[in-house]
Image (cartoon, rainbow, N blue to C red):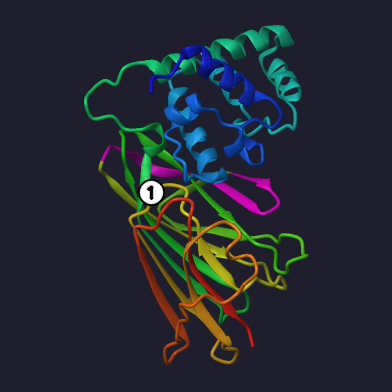
């Protein structure tokens, strides 16, 4: 299906309204033209759609002049310093930054969006085309959740693969459930162990944490890089008995190990696989129960987890 430039332009203008790309339920607000150019598929949930939009815009606007690039990022809700609720507020912020009137900024916004349309419609430079949403993917994701210490902690190691040249930043995100069904979302402590530098972080919603990570050097297509993070629940804050990974981009392999407290072993543990949204909310045991080994650990692996589906374990405390 070919993309009509007028339709793509109108969809981009519509997307700028309200919170832009940060709009909750963004998958319901993205039109067919944007879905095609961003590589959105039918099974993508809201976060997967948001990630693909963000990656496509960032890649397309990379070579724009600074004032044009900011006139695209801010209205779409993608500029770290312009996370305002309404488009008018983001336009006013941009006008102050560029020392221009709001009408001038809106003209620059339209010019920037037009540049995005031009990038989207340009022919591929070769027969091997890399979709904008595939700037990089995860080769291996290995998580070790430790529940036998003073507070729950998880070591997450990822090996990423560049799918195009010049990948120097990646985004890492985590969504945490409330400790109790009627409780407020908690906090997280995140520490870089090796392989990346934390250069930006935000909390787009009460439950979602988003980190921007810089690689030590740009990766070219096919090159790999490993990094590790330590994620801890602050002392005194309870954790819901669940760890489920929801891939936002292609992942070749996911492995999860959980080490329980030998003095406080769970009543039951079960494997979660191919879960849909809300399937894991009520903590109802799944048929695939998991036995603990002699030292109180479980080890599960998931080859080729699908985007938009949930994989991991849940348990019932005694």
How far across and down, in percent of the image, does residue 137 sit?
Answer: 37, 46
Give the vertical position of 195 relative to 95 (above or below).
Answer: below
- Asked whether 230 or 159 is in front, the reply is 159
| 211 part of magenta stretch | yes
**Residue 123 relative to residue 127: left or right:** right
Q: Residue at x 64, y 30 (%)?
A: 20
Q: Residue at x 68, y 19 (%)?
A: 94
**Residue 102 relative to residue 228: left or right:** right
Magenta range is 201-221
Q: Residue at x 27, y 38 (%)?
A: 221
Give the vertical position of 46 relative to 227 (above or below).
Answer: above
Quarter of the image containing the C terminus?
A: bottom right
* Residue at disc 1, secondary structure: loop
- Which residue is disc 1 drawn over? 250
How far across and down, in percent of the image, does residue 177 sit?
Answer: 65, 62
Using the rendered view, name the quadrant where residue 81 is placed.
top right
Q: Is residue 74 visible?
A: no
Q: Is residue 62 visible?
A: yes
Q: What main secondary structure does the magenta stretch of the protein show?
A: strand
How far across and down, in percent of the image, does residue 188 sit?
Answer: 64, 60
- Asked whether 96 or 46 is in front, the reply is 46
């Amino acid at each position: 299906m070919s993309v009509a430039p007028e339709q793509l332009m109108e969809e981009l203008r519509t997307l700028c309204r309200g919170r832009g790309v940060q709009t909750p339920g963004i998958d319901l607000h993205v039109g067919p033209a944007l879905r095609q150019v961003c590589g959105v598929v039918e099974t993508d949930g809201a976060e997967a759609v948001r990630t693909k939009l963000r990656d496509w815009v960032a890649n397309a606007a990379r070579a724009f002049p600074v004032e044009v690039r900011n006139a695209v990022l801010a209205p779409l809700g993608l500029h770290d310093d312009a996370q305002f609720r309404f488009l008018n507020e983001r336009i006013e912020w941009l006008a102050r930054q560029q020392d221009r009137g709001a009408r001038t900024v809106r003209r620059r916004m339209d010019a920037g969006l037009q540049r995005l349309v031009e990038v989207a419609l340009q022919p591929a430079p070769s027969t091997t085309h890399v979709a904008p949403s595939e700037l990089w993917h995860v080769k291996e994701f290995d998580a070790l959740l430790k529940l036998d210490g003073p507070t729950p902690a998880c070591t997450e190691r990822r090996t990423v693969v560049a799918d195009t040249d010049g990948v120097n930043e990646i985004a890492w995100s985590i969504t945490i459930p409330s400790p109790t069904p009627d409780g407020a979302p908690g906090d997280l402590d995140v520490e870089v162990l090796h392989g990346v530098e934390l250069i930006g972080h935000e909390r787009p919603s009460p439950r979602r944490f988003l980190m921007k990570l810089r690689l030590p050097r740009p990766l070219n297509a096919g090159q790999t890089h490993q990094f590790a993070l330590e994620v801890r629940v602050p002392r005194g804050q309870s954790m819901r008995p669940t760890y489920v990974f929801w891939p936002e981009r292609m992942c070749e392999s996911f492995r999860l190990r959980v080490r329980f407290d030998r003095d406080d072993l769970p009543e039951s543990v079960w494997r979660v696989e191919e879960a849909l949204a809300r399937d894991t909310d009520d903590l109802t045991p799944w048929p695939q129960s998991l036995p603990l080994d002699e030292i109180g650990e479980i080890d599960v692996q998931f080859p080729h987890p699908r985007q938009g589906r949930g994989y991991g374990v849940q348990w019932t405390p005694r």
